[in-house]
Amino acid sequence: RPQTYAIKLKLPKGLTCTQCVLQWKYNAGNSYGMSNDGRNCKGCGKQEQFYGCADVAISPADNGSQGNGSPRPNLVQEQIVESRPQLIPTFVNGDGATCRGVQAFRFINSFADSWCQSNCRQGYCPMIYCTPACQKLTVYG
């Protein structure tokens, strides 16, 4: 479902566009690690780096005022885009076993199952990442 976020930005004077990409990055430590003094705690140790982007339009200022005589700032025009979840078929082999990532791969990669299903169907199916059921796939769904 679409969500609206309010952010304050300082844009270069005169910047306008109808199809721009707003990019950002931030650091966070949301997993357990070791601090400099040897403690194990959530958020300690190396930080993870996250990136995001959004499609935006930036409209020109209308040089009006906000009632106090000051010019209006450039505004970022909000565009709400609805996305629908993509239905992904279940991949099973001839024995009815589901192709999945091995447990260790699923632990570090939330997309392990779809990675194995996609790559194994194309002939690249390393057993270090994917279960034996992935070796021979048929698509149902």
Image (cartoon, helix red, strand yellow):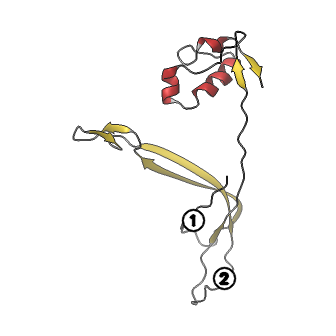
Residue 63 occupies quadrant: bottom right
Residue 128 position within the rendered picture, expressed as x and y whole percent measured from the top left:
52, 15
Residue at horizontal 72 percent and vertical 52 percent from the top: 82
- Report the residue that reaches farthest toward the top: 95
Task: Examine the rendering and report whether any part of residue 15 can be seen.
Answer: no
What distance separates the C-alpha of mark 1 from that of mark 2?
Answer: 22 Å
Q: Is residue 127 above or below residue 108?
A: above
Left or right of 92? Residue 68 is left
**Residue placed under numbered mark 2 in the picture:** 63
Left or right of 99? Residue 35 is left
Residue 31 position within the rendered picture, expressed as x and y whole percent measured from the top left:
40, 39
Residue at horizontal 40 percent and vertical 44 percent from the top: 29
Residue 62 position within the rendered picture, expressed as x and y whole percent measured from the top left:
69, 80
**Residue placed under numbered mark 1 in the picture:** 6
Task: Examine the rendering and report whether any part of residue 11 can be seen.
Answer: yes
**Around disc 1, counting alpha carbons within 10 Å, would you say few (fewer than 14), some (14 to 19), or many (20 or more)?**
few
Q: Secondary structure at mark 2?
A: loop
Total marks drawn? 2
Question: Residue 77 or 93: which is nearer the viewer?
Answer: 93
Residue 2 occupies quadrant: bottom right
Q: Is residue 130 above or below residue 62?
A: above
Quarter of the picture containing the C terminus is top right
Q: Is residue 21 above or below residue 13?
A: above
Residue at horizontal 60 percent and vertical 83 percent from the top: 71
Q: Residue type at mark 2? A: Asn
Residue 132 position within the rendered picture, expressed as x and y whole percent measured from the top left:
60, 11
Residue at horizontal 53 percent and vertical 47 percent from the top: 51
Left or right of 48? Residue 63 is right
Q: Residue type at mark 1? A: Ala
